[in-house]
Each structure stands twice: as structure tokens, then as C-alpha cells.
């Protein structure tokens, strides 16, 4: 591996073996590259998964999950961009999840049994659209807010089956991803200008709170910081 | 085709806490030691730089430090009559991968078990009678005593620079420490951490109720420290990213921050990464070495005189089963030892909500920053007539204010929408959580074996986990949760919400990474997989490290005991085995 070769060049005594195994063999010191870091996989607006119709659904849904008041709604903070980017990447593809069949409906205690998250979104959104059409109702995005809430609540309770996937799994995943986009670091496309952090007074990726250990129950209010560096609204 | 490599004295499978401890101890003997790690090399300053490490999306929710389930996972069911299904995503527990293993993302809460914990069956039978132990429990004595382990607990405390207040020094009870702990041969190497407001409020309430609170023992540095290997750690900066995160500040004791800087310089140590061990090979009752595969699919046989399994418990057990070592436990007949006595932990708690005039500032936190009471752990209280045995500690740890994971709201808050949002805003800085960290007693039906349907990326059957909480666990946890509620109500908030143990056990919500058992220790091959020195009864040059050795799980975090058991084993190997290889205990 690169690290080992650099260590070798730096004079740390190391390895000798066949090329294939030497690349991952460490001996005689700690491989270390000064000044290097592994930055986060930041938001890329080109990396998208959702169709415009699916985006409209997600926008309408996340703004019922976290609506606007004096603080922004989910979509106003970039949560739809966050979700779209995540679904197009390793998370949406399920790269690090066990995705071998057979797929079966499990007990609630057995956890996620759906296909990869991007496919879960695609199937669930289509199933909801088809279900509403079959019942002679308007599309989700055109429903009044209270009917959107009723539908989301039914999904959250596992009521009203979808034809291709599990509605509760979809709700749980969407709601989890919404919170990730709302409260996560802004480098991933959500929590724009760290507004969600300001709302609750979370100071973000600060390194050292030692001056505030003895706060005596007084609120510690600090400008938030992103792992991308301080960001000015 | 399998390439046969040159023989080594020692091969280690898995390079987390115990792998590093084994390598450090045995390279001191001049042995030629090779460690095989399935993951990658990780360097603290590069991979966990302080300006990147505090990232909830990446580390908590995209699992960057945790194992990759696309390669291998397990299947799960609550009861043997159900069909097990794969754990497709991580949830309930978070095994690590890469150099450092799960120890990279631990909290640093570093406990010793009680002397009576090691005599779980004989002590309770003696005090309460045999009928006091539910017939479904398969708990047993460890075959090792607290007195035997004490010097090794002490070694680990000093390696890590544990911060704390001794409660029992050589039999003398000390003011301000845990009066229930076993006798210590020396004080903690560092003073307790500085406390924030929430644990102080918990301690005040506990004291008013007549309990004796003490600072939680912590592997987060309370001051700069240099350990006996000459490795230095830095003072903790209370950044609130310990559990589930790596520390870029060299403030949390891990293999990388306490052992590797010394170990990696030794010429008789070699580490290979990307080496996925598939089997332990045996011939004539001895391990001949291990077979591993690289990410390119090349297969190697590594011959060795001694083999140490230092992977996470499910992987250690899986390697035994895939290698045909020992008999797999059958809960119907009670025969077989491999996979028996899997146990977990019983977690419950309460939230105390305050008005605006009291701010918690939860982000000023650290993994092991807290105050605890131990009155209701183990057999520290009279169980007569209670209908269960065992217990747990009750604590207020202020670990984090990371807002995706931590945004407590009252239990009658709407699931989503404006009401939820406003409740998050109102309570984020004004809520204190306290918890009971309880024992899990091994039960007949709980076990590990091989799944008939699902396979891993290497074509092997997945490990199958069958687990639910025992009647004892449920009754014990309910009792502890009542004590939690009493303290919570004494803490002066405007509202208390109680979160009891969730039954049946659910593989999805995170609870704790304190899985135990499956290759348990004991005093006979009839009741265990290893002897008291972690040595396989079946294959005397095979040693198994980790919480898989626990016959049941006491009410504490396991890492201190995992390390003490490893040092105990290695002391005997150095004292006796190397001169005279063979069984350290006669069966």
C-alpha cells in the first residue's frame, strides 16, 4: 500500500516479500504520512438518483416530517439534496449491507429485510402513487397536508400494505434519512448554513470544550463549526 | 491453489485490543509473531484527524469504522422455532473492522467485575439455595477468580492510564470510590475526569437517597499520561465523539494509542492486512496454521506453532465451527459446547426533563464521563424473595450531544411534524438521561450455530444467532429500572420518562456492543470450550481471546475483563507453555 512505500522511502526499515503481499505487510515501524488526512465524501450535485417525480414526492414528504416554522423546513435545509446524493452512492446501492437473497418478510425484531435503500425508495414511492390512483385519490404531492400526515402515519404504524415492499421499512428509512440530512454536517448537502444546529444550539465539530466543563447549568452558546471548516451564513 | 508460506511461531487472527496484547507480550519472548487482519491499516493522525473525526453522518450512520456486512454477517431469530433472517444492516451492536477493531470506537468505560461475578452459580446457590437460579439458566463459574485476575486488571489500568477513584485498596474502603469493588493492588493511575453538571446532579440525588456515587472509571485521559510501554496519551478535550467514533486527539486508550507505537518497531512482529482468515487447519489434535484469502482472491496457508483467535466473538465462534473444532451446541440435547451460553446486556433508563433555566450542554461530553452507583450490581444487595439473581450499575454518563442520534423528547411527543420539531428544540439542552447497565444471564435456548440457508461472500454458511432475554433478565431489569426511576425523580426535573428493557430482543435499535459467550471458559471440557487460560480443550496450541470466554455477562462493560483474561492467559503461556507446550490444565 502507498503508506508502506512512503514509510520505506522515509527510511523506516520495512518489509521484503512478493509484490502482492508486500503491499499490505507492515513491519519495523508505523507507516505514517505527515500532513495527510482522509476528508469526508462531500455532497456532489451531479450524483443523483431520484427522478423528478420521485424528488417531488420526497420533497412533499420530508416537509411534513419537518415542516417550516420560525426555523426552516427539511427541504429548505437541503434534505432532499442530501437524500438524493446518498441514494446515488454507496448507501443507496447497499454496498456495505448484506443484500443476498432470499428476501423474506421477517418479524419486527429481525430488522431491515428490504432491497437496497435506493430500490426501496423507488418501489415504495411507485406503490404509494399506484395505491392512491387505484383509490381514485390525487397524487401524494397534491393531497392536503392533513391527508399527507394521515398517510405517513399509517405507513409508520405498518398499516396499509404496499405491493412491492414494506411500508413501515420505507417510512423508518425516510424518517431516519430526513433526520440525518437535517442535523448532519452541511458537507453532505443538508443542514444548510448549519441552521438546524443553530436551532438547538449544537456547536458542531468543535474540538475542545474544556473551557466549558464547569458551566453550572448555564447555556453554552457557540457559533457552529462544520467538518468542512467554519461556514458563514 | 493455496500458496504455503514460511512457518511462524505465532499467528494471530484479528488485530484489535486482544490481538495487540498477544503480540506485545509474545514478541517480548523473542517469538516470531504474525498478525492477520481482514481490514486495513489505520493511522490515528491520518485516518482520524481531529478536523474530520466529528462527523455523525459518516461514522455513526454510514458505518465507516464498523464491519462490512456485505462480506459476512449473521442471521437472527428470537427462538429456535422461528426462521432466522440475515442482519442486513448493523443496529443492535457494532463490531469493528480494520486495525484496532471495535476498540477504536469504544467509550472507554473500564470496569473490573466483582469477585462474586466469577462464581455466578456457586455463590448464588450457596447464599440463596439452588432453587433461586431459574432452571432455564445455564450460568456457571468461570474457573478463574478475581484474585487471579487482579494483577492483570492492574496491568491494563496502567497500560491505558485509567482515570478513577479507588474504592477498595487492598481491602481498605476508600472515600469517594466504589465501595463494592474487589480489592485493588494499586490506585488508578490517573485522577477522575472533571465532571459537568449532569453527572453531578445525578450524584447529588443518589447521595440524598443514601447511595454512594463515584466517578466512572475512564480510559479518556484526565491528564497527559505516558504508559509503561513509553507511549504518551493527551488530555481529553471533552469533544463528545467517543462511542462509535475514533479519537484523533490520542486521548482515548486504544490499541493504536497504547500498544502499537511500541509493538510495531519490534523486528519480530509483522502485520498483514487484507487477510481474511477462513479456517484454522488441524492435524492430529493440533492446529497446524490458518488459511486466509486476500481481496484479490489469492489463498494462503500460514503454518504456525501457536494460533490465537482474537476476532470479535461471533467470528471466533464461526472460525471454530468452520474449522470443525469442537462440537456445536444443540439446545435440545444440551450437548456440545461451541456456540453455547451466548449472552448480551440488559439496558434500560430514564430521561429527566428540565425547564429552560437549567442547561445540560450535552455536547461537552466524553465516552466515560459520568457518575455511577453500584448498590444494585451483582450480589451487592440482598436478593432474597426478589425472584432473580444478578444486577447492574446505574449511571449518568454525559457522552454526547450529537443531534442526529441525541434529541430526547417527552414520550407523548408526536412521531414527526411541527410538534416533534418544537419538542426537539425545547428539550435538546434541558434533558438528562440516566441508565441501568445490567447483566445478561445465559439461558438454554440462546446460542450460536450455522445457518442452513444464507452464505457469506466466501461461500461459507452464515453464523446463526438465536437470542431472547431470559425470565431472570426481565425481572432483574425491571427491578433496576424502578431504582433508576427513583433516582430520576429525585433529580429535580419537571418530568421523568422511563424506558424499560425492550422485550423481545430486537436486532435493530442500538443497545450495546457487549456480546458475550459462545466459546466460554470453564473447569472441564464438559462445560466449556477453553480452560481458565483461554486455551482450547480440544486443540492445545489454539487460544481464544475476548468476551466469547464469558460464561455469562455481568452488569458491567466487558473490555477491562477481556484484557485481564488475555494478560492472565499470556502470563501462564510465558511462565509455563513456552517451555512445555501442551495443555495448561489437565482435563
Image (spheres, coloured by chain):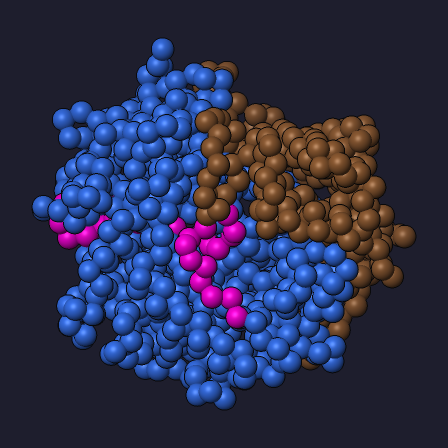
Quadrant including the N terminus of chain A: top right
Where does residue B163 sit, x and y in percent of width and height? 49, 67
Where does residue B491 sit, x and y in percent of width and height? 57, 82
Residue B99 relative to residue A39: left or right: left
Residue occupying image coordinates x 39% and y 67%: B477
Where does residue B458 sit, x and y in percent of width and height? 41, 23
Q: Assess whether residue B510 is covered by the magenta stretch.
A: yes
Residue B501 relative to residue B146: left or right: right
Is B487 rendered above or below residue A15?
A: below
Tell me the chief SS of the magenta region: loop
Where does residue B156 sit, x and y in percent of width and height? 39, 58
Is B497 rendered above or below residue A184?
A: below
Q: Among all residues in the image, which is located at the extreme left?
A: B587
Residue A98 relative to residue B139: left or right: right
Question: Which chain is rendered brown in the image?
Answer: A
- Quadrant of res A36: top right
Question: Which one is nearer the viewer's eye here, A7 or B371?
Answer: B371
Question: Which chain is rendered blue in the image?
Answer: B
Residue occupying image coordinates x 18% and y 30%: B286
Residue occupying image coordinates x 85% and y 51%: A193
Is A83 rendered above or below residue A214?
A: above
Q: Among all residues in the image, which is located at the extreme front?
A: A136
Q: Which residues are magenta?
A: B498-525
Q: Can residue A94 be seen here?
A: no
Q: Assess whether residue B363 is covered by the magenta stretch.
A: no
Residue occupying image coordinates x 61% and y 66%: B411
Q: Can residue B451 be seen here?
A: yes
Residue B492 relative to residue B71: left or right: right
Question: Which one is nearer the viewer's eye here, B326 or B163?
Answer: B326
Amino acid at each position: 500500500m502507498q503508506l508502506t512505500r512512503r514509510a520505506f522511502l522515509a527510511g523506516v526499515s520495512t518489509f521484503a516479500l512478493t509484490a502482492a503481499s508486500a503491499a499490505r505487510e507492515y513491519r519495523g515501524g508505523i507507516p505514517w504520512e505527515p500532513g495527510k488526512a482522509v476528508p469526508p465524501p462531500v455532497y456532489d450535485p451531479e450524483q443523483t438518483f431520484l427522478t423528478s417525480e420521485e424528488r417531488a414526492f420526497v420533497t412533499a414528504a420530508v416537509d411534513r416530517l419537518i415542516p417550516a416554522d420560525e426555523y426552516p423546513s427539511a427541504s429548505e435545509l437541503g434534505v432532499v439534496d442530501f437524500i438524493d446524493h446518498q441514494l446515488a452512492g454507496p448507501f443507496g446501492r447497499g454496498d456495505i449491507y448484506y443484500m443476498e437473497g432470499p428476501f423474506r418478510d421477517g418479524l419486527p425484531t429481525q430488522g431491515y429485510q428490504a432491497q437496497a435503500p435506493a430500490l426501496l425508495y423507488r418501489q415504495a414511492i411507485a406503490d404509494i402513487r399506484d395505491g392512491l390512483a387505484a383509490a381514485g385519490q390525487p397524487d401524494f404531492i397534491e393531497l392536503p397536508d392533513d391527508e399527507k400526515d394521515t398517510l405517513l402515519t399509517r405507513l409508520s404504524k405498518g398499516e396499509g400494505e404496499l405491493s412491492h415492499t414494506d411500508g413501515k421499512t420505507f417510512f423508518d428509512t425516510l424518517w431516519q434519512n430526513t433526520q440525518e440530512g437535517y442535523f448532519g454536517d452541511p458537507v453532505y448537502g443538508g443542514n444548510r448554513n448549519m441552521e438546524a444546529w443553530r436551532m438547538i444550539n449544537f456547536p458542531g465539530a468543535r474540538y475542545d470544550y474544556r473551557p466549558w466543563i464547569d458551566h453550572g447549568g448555564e447555556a453554552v452558546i457557540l457559533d457552529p463549526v462544520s467538518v468542512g471548516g467554519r461556514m458563514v451564513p | 491453489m493455496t500458496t504455503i508460506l514460511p512457518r511462524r511461531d505465532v499467528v494471530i487472527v484479528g488485530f484489535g485490543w486482544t490481538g495487540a496484547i498477544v503480540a506485545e507480550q509474545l514478541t517480548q519472548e523473542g517469538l516470531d509473531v504474525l498478525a492477520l487482519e481482514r481490514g486495513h491499516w489505520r493511522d490515528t493522525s491520518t485516518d482520524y484527524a481531529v478536523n474530520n473525526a466529528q462527523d455523525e453522518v459518516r461514522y455513526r450512520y454510514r458505518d465507516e469504522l464498523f464491519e462490512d456486512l456485505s462480506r459476512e454477517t449473521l442471521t437472527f431469530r428470537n427462538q429456535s422455532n422461528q426462521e432466522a433472517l440475515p442482519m442486513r444492516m448493523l443496529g443492535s451492536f457494532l463490531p469493528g473492522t480494520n486495525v484496532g477493531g471495535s476498540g477504536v470506537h469504544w467509550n472507554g468505560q473500564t470496569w473490573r467485575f466483582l469477585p462474586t461475578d466469577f462464581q455466578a452459580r456457586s455463590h448464588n446457590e450457596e447464599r440463596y439455595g439452588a432453587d433461586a437460579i431459574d432452571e432455564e439458566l445455564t450460568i456457571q463459574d468461570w474457573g478463574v477468580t478475581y484474585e487471579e485476575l487482579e494483577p492483570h486488571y492492574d496491568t491494563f489500568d496502567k497500560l491505558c492510564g485509567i482515570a478513577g477513584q479507588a474504592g477498595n485498596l487492598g481491602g481498605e474502603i476508600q472515600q469517594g470510590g466504589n465501595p463494592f469493588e474487589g480489592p485493588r493492588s494499586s490506585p488508578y493511575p490517573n485522577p477522575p475526569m472533571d465532571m459537568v453538571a449532569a453527572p453531578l446532579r445525578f450524584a447529588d440525588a443518589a447521595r440524598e437517597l443514601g447511595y454512594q456515587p463515584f466517578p466512572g472509571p475512564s480510559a479518556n485521559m484526565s491528564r497527559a499520561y505516558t504508559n509503561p510501554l513509553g507511549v504518551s496519551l493527551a488530555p481529553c478535550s471533552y469533544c463528545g465523539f467517543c462511542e462509535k467514533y475514533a479519537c484523533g486527539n490520542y486521548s482515548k486508550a486504544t490499541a493504536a494509542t497504547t500498544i502499537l507505537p511500541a509493538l510495531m518497531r519490534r523486528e519480530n512482529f509483522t502485520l498483514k492486512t487484507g487477510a481474511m482468515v477462513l479456517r484454522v487447519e488441524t492435524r492430529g489434535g493440533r492446529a497446524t496454521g490458518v488459511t486466509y484469502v486476500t481481496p484479490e482472491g489469492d489463498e494462503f496457508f500460514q503454518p504456525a506453532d501457536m494460533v490465537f483467535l482474537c476476532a470479535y466473538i461471533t467470528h471466533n465462534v464461526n472460525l471454530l465451527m468452520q474449522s470443525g473444532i469442537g462440537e456445536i451446541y444443540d439446545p435440545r440435547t444440551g450437548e456440545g459446547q461451541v456456540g453455547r451460553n451466548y449472552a448480551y446486556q440488559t439496558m434500560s433508563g430514564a430521561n429527566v426533563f428540565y425547564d429552560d433555566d437549567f442547561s445540560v450542554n450535552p455536547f461537552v461530553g466524553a465516552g466515560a464521563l459520568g457518575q455511577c452507583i453500584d448498590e444494585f450490581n451483582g450480589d451487592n444487595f440482598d436478593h432474597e424473595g426478589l425472584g432473580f439473581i444478578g444486577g447492574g450499575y446505574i449511571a449518568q454518563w454525559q457522552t454526547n450531544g450529537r443531534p442526529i442520534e441525541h434529541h430526547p423528547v417527552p414520550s407523548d411527543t408526536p412521531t414527526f411534524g411541527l410538534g416533534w420539531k418544537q419538542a426537539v428544540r425545547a428539550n435538546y439542552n434541558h434533558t438528562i438521561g440516566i441508565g441501568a447497565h445490567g447483566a445478561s444471564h445465559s439461558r438454554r435456548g440462546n446460542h450460536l450455530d450455522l445457518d442452513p440457508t444464507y452464505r457469506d461472500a466466501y461461500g461459507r454458511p452464515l453464523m446463526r444467532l438465536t437470542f431472547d432475554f431470559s425470565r431472570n433478565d426481565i425481572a432483574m431489569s425491571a427491578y433496576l429500572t424502578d431504582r433508576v426511576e427513583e433516582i430520576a425523580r429525585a433529580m429535580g426535573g419537571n418530568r421523568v420518562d422511563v424506558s424499560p428493557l425492550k422485550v423481545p430482543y430486537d436486532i435493530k435499535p442500538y443497545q450495546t456492543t457487549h456480546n458475550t459467550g459462545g466459546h466460554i471458559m470453564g473447569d472441564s471440557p464438559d462445560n466449556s470450550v477453553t480452560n481458565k487460560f483461554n486455551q482450547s480443550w480440544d486443540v492445545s496450541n489454539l487460544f481464544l481471546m475476548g468476551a466469547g470466554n464469558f460464561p455469562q455477562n455481568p452488569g458491567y462493560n466487558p473490555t477491562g475483563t477481556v484484557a485481564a483474561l488475555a494478560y492472565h492467559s499470556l502470563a501462564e503461556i510465558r511462565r509455563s507453555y513456552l517451555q512445555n507446550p501442551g495443555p495448561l490444565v489437565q482435563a
